[in-house]
Amino acid sequence: MIDTHVEEKLCKLFEKNGITVYNIKSNRFKTNTINIFFHDNLNKDTVALNALFPSVLRRGCKGLPNIKEINLYLEKMYGAVFDCGIVKKGERQIIHFYFEYISDKYTNEKQRNFEKAFEFLMNIIFRPELKNGSFNEQYVEQEKNNLKMIVKGRTNDKIQYSMERCYELMCKDEPFGLYEYGTIEQIDEITNDKLYEHYKKKIASLPAEIFITGEMEEKDEAFIKEKLSLVERSPTQKLNSSIIFKCVKEVKEYEDKMDVNQAKLCMGFRTHVHPADNDYYALLVFNGLLGGGMHSKLFQNVREKAGLAYYVFAGLEKFKGLMVIASGIDIKNKDTAQEIIMKQLDEIRSGNITEYEYEATLKSIKTGIMSLKDSQLYVVDFYLSQLINGTHDTMETLVEKVNRVTVDDIIKVADNVQLDTIYFLTSKSHENSN
């Protein structure tokens, strides 16, 4: 069977008013997406404000002043999907607006969705629903409450929380240590007028990108250019680079107590590898070999042979050059689990890597990368990450570079990985039971 799919590649179309427009051409899906990203530095003074204003914008805009009107509009566009939110990548806080609609190829000739989709996002971002020259105060208060519920609810997923907490404590003196949704205190301090002034300043000055997935016509590009020329923008704000190279002088240890039956042991490492370095590809393989799946040393030796963990894996925060090993263990096994986990790292440093481990890791990474193509959002995220890192890989070239990683490359990377922080989430009742 002939594969007729177009290979997804990021193509820069043009830049206008500090907003760069890209197309990721693809015929793999029946829907197209428009993704608009605004990039800001993580900063304690603005993190909660940035987290809040997209939620308020989502509530209404010019011509569609409330959620009910927005939903009716989406239904008329064959059930289009709109959302927005924020994401943390390294020491950047990124504000994301997203619109998915059925490709014009699959609608009748009289109904074109692209212009409607793009116009909708422009209205949401640049022409919000206002009252008395500011945001609708009712929307702001409701969204403040919603945001506080997100902050309070972050402990519900103990695995995710323990990893985030480990990173936050590890980087408490760096921007990366900030939680991307802010704190309850920061949210409480936000007033309607303060938020509106912040929104106007940021939306006019933050570097921004537009990614359009799917096939575009020439008139689509001209339409975007015309719309962006009408946007009022000021000089673009500069973005800082993430702090990646930091010497560890002493391993830090922290412990939290909650109502848990199973303890979470997280160990945070500094890899000292920038994602644009050639060593990054070896770091990917090292991480996969150490804790990237059922073939990995952590899974086989900590979970299966020693029976010490309910789960154990290693994960990278590539934008910041960090790695975390996360595990769920019995409380009494902390020291033993920690010792065996570190032993697996030493095994790699010593070159004790079997052919099966090496080949299974390469295969697992390749499968993971190529499976990103099954989701338009993952494809967009892949290329957004390339831009942030200053790299130019496609999924195919990334796989090729991973395949060229040797055992010696893995050992070299492993030698530079340093344990920085040990975080233990344990039970409140543990001390009382001893």
Image: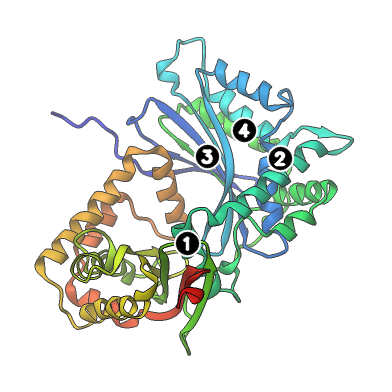
Between the residue at mark 3 and the residue at mark 4, the CA separation in whole angstroms equals: 9 Å
Identity of the residue drawn at 40% across and 69% down: 324
Q: Earlier along the polypeptide chain: callout 3 or callout 4?
A: 3
Between the residue at mark 3 and the residue at mark 1, the CA separation in whole angstroms equals: 39 Å
Looking at the image, residue 395 sits to the left or right of residue 355; the answer is right
Q: Quadrant of the C terminus?
A: bottom left
On the image, numbered disc 4 is attached to which residue? 121
Instruction: Give whichever of 181, 231 is nearer the camera.
Output: 181
Q: Nearer the viewer, mark 1 or mark 2?
A: 1
Between the residue at mark 4 and the residue at mark 1, the CA separation in whole angstroms equals: 43 Å
Query: What amino acid is at disc 4?
Result: Leu
Identity of the residue drawn at 18% across and 71% down: 406
Instruction: Give whichever of 344, 428 is nearer the camera.
Output: 428
Q: Nearer the viewer, mark 2 or mark 4?
A: 2
On the image, numbered disc 3 is attached to which residue? 35
Task: Count residues near mark 1 (Cα–Cα under 10 Å), then give few for <14, some for 14-19, many for 20+.
Answer: some
Identity of the residue drawn at 40% across and 59% down: 391
Residue that sits furthest to the right in the current view: 132
Query: What amino acid is at disc 1?
Result: Val
Q: Is residue 386 above or below residue 96?
A: below
Image quadrant of residue 5? Answer: top left
Marks 3 and 4: CB-CB under 8 Å?
no
On the image, numbered disc 1 is attached to which residue? 260
Under circle 1, the secondary element is loop
Image quadrant of residue 357? Answer: bottom left
Marks 2 and 3: CB-CB under 8 Å?
no
Q: Nearer the viewer, mark 3 or mark 1?
A: 1
- Residue 242 seen from this side: no
Between the residue at mark 1 and the residue at mark 2, the CA separation in whole angstroms equals: 35 Å
